[in-house]
Amino acid sequence: MVSVFTPQSLEAFLENPPERFEWVDEKLIETPEMTAKTGRIQARLAYHWRSYIISSGQGGEVYTETACRTVGRVRCPDVAYLPPALVQQFGDFKVLPQSFPLIGEIISPTDAAEDIFSKVKEYLESYAQEIWLIFPESRWLMIITPEVQQLLSENQNATTIKVLPGFSVPVGGLIA
């Protein structure tokens, strides 16, 4: 029999965060398994961001499904970028004590719109500067900052607005 640690508080969760779980409203919420399509999109986005931070010399780190604090919650964005200064400040963290500045979330057909945009609001209230929402089935990409919301089709290029200056990628190339 395998014993599974079930934290009884946010503090206990932060000490030993179980994989594939988020802390939401005082409860453990299991994150859904990725499909082949969402896993492929996640890998492509992480690859493009990582390649760009290396080729541009901007540095920093790209993470996948790594826990970060939001307002009273712990979330695990599908893809996230942390600039060099924050990498140095936080080192090898168990849970980043704030949102990542740049976040990519791949939206499944079963995700409720209210839940998606509530999560975006949490990220923005916890120091995220830019969130990319990728909708694989409808083939859209939405970029959200506190000031701007852009909806892009697969025929357009997605360009970062606040984080990773100069980065651009064809939306169709991410979603294909």
Image (tube, rainbow, N blue to C red):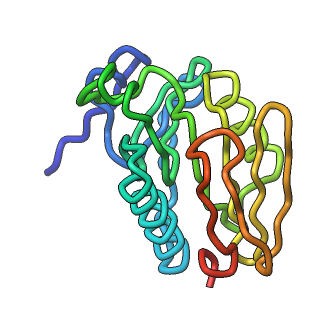
Q: Is residue 58 left or right of residue 129?
A: left
The one nearer the camera, 91 or 78, is 91
- Image coordinates for residue 92, horizontal then vertical, percent: 23, 30
The one nearer the camera, 39 or 26, is 39
The one nearer the camera, 33 or 95, is 95
Residue at horizontal 18 percent and vertical 41 percent from the top: 3
- Image coordinates for residue 67, horizontal then vertical, percent: 42, 36
The C terminus sits in image quarter: bottom right
Q: Is residue 2 left or right of residue 80?
A: left
- Image coordinates for residue 74, horizontal then vertical, percent: 50, 30
Q: On screen, 148 above or below 135? A: above
Q: Is residue 135 left or right of residue 57?
A: right
Q: Is residue 92 left or right of residue 136?
A: left
Judged from this view, the residue extending furthest toward the left is 1
Q: On screen, 167 above or below 145? A: below
The number of discs equals: 0
Residue at horizontal 72 percent and vertical 45 percent from the top: 161
Residue at horizontal 60 percent and vertical 41 percent from the top: 163
- Image coordinates for residue 11, horizontal then vertical, percent: 37, 14
Residue at horizontal 78 percent and vertical 53 percent from the top: 112
The one nearer the camera, 113 or 59, is 59
